[in-house]
Image (cartoon, helix red, strand yellow):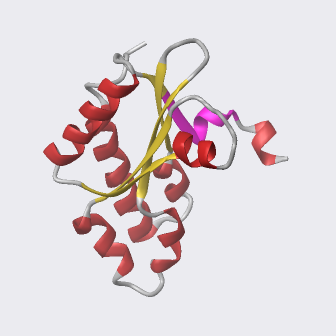
Amino acid sequence: MLFKEIPMDNFIFENRSRYNFDETIEKLSKQIVAYDWKNPYTHDLQLTLRNYGKDVLAVKVFEICHPRLSGQLLEKDNERIVSSLMPCRISVYEKSDGNTYISRLNSGMMSAMMGGLIAKVMQEATQEVEKIIAPIVSQE
């Protein structure tokens, strides 16, 4: 099994936020706008699961995109295959230790295996997402 051989932190980045859940959500929302990214939808997974009778700690998933970047891939037939990885997602959640965390897919690493325009665009997107969250996460 591939996932047991390669540490999960190679595929998914996780950092503890410097702030509580609500402050993290507020700061992340402002950072997304400040970097001129779009946030077409935010999933409230805690609320969704509560509606189905399951109680979990707070979890919100931001779907974000930058039309300049995503357009480069979606306008080409051969690159459109990566649309299943779009838009970029940033998850903010609480853990039982009382802290808030931010996670996101390491799409830069994953796209490097694809090469070409996909790698170029997705690596740029990864770098920009890291800049967006940098002021929010702890530098442990």
User: In front here: 45 or 113?
Assistant: 45
Residues in magenta, as a range:
7-14
Residue 72, percent from left and from top? 30, 74
* Horizontal arrangement in the rendering, residue 23 relative to residue 98 (left or right): left
Toward the bottom, the furthest residue is 77
User: In front here: 65 or 25?
Assistant: 25
Q: Tally the numbered discs.
A: 0
- Residue at 24%, 45% in the rendered image: 32
- Residue at 38%, 84% in the rendered image: 76
Residue 103, percent from left and from top? 49, 36
Residue 13 within the segment the image draws in magenta: yes
Note whether 85 is above or below 36 in the view shown: below
* Horizontal arrangement in the rendering, residue 9 relative to residue 92 (left or right): right
* Horizontal arrangement in the rendering, residue 11 relative to residue 87 (left or right): right
- Residue at 79%, 38% in the rendered image: 5
Residue 140 within the segment the image draws in magenta: no
Note whether 127 is above or below 26 in the view shown: below
Note whether 29 is above or below 21 in the view shown: below
Q: Which quarter of the figure is the C terminus placed in? A: top left
The quadrant in which residue 75 appears is bottom left
- Residue at 25%, 31% in the rendered image: 27
The quadrant in which residue 114 appears is bottom right
User: In front here: 30 or 11?
Assistant: 30
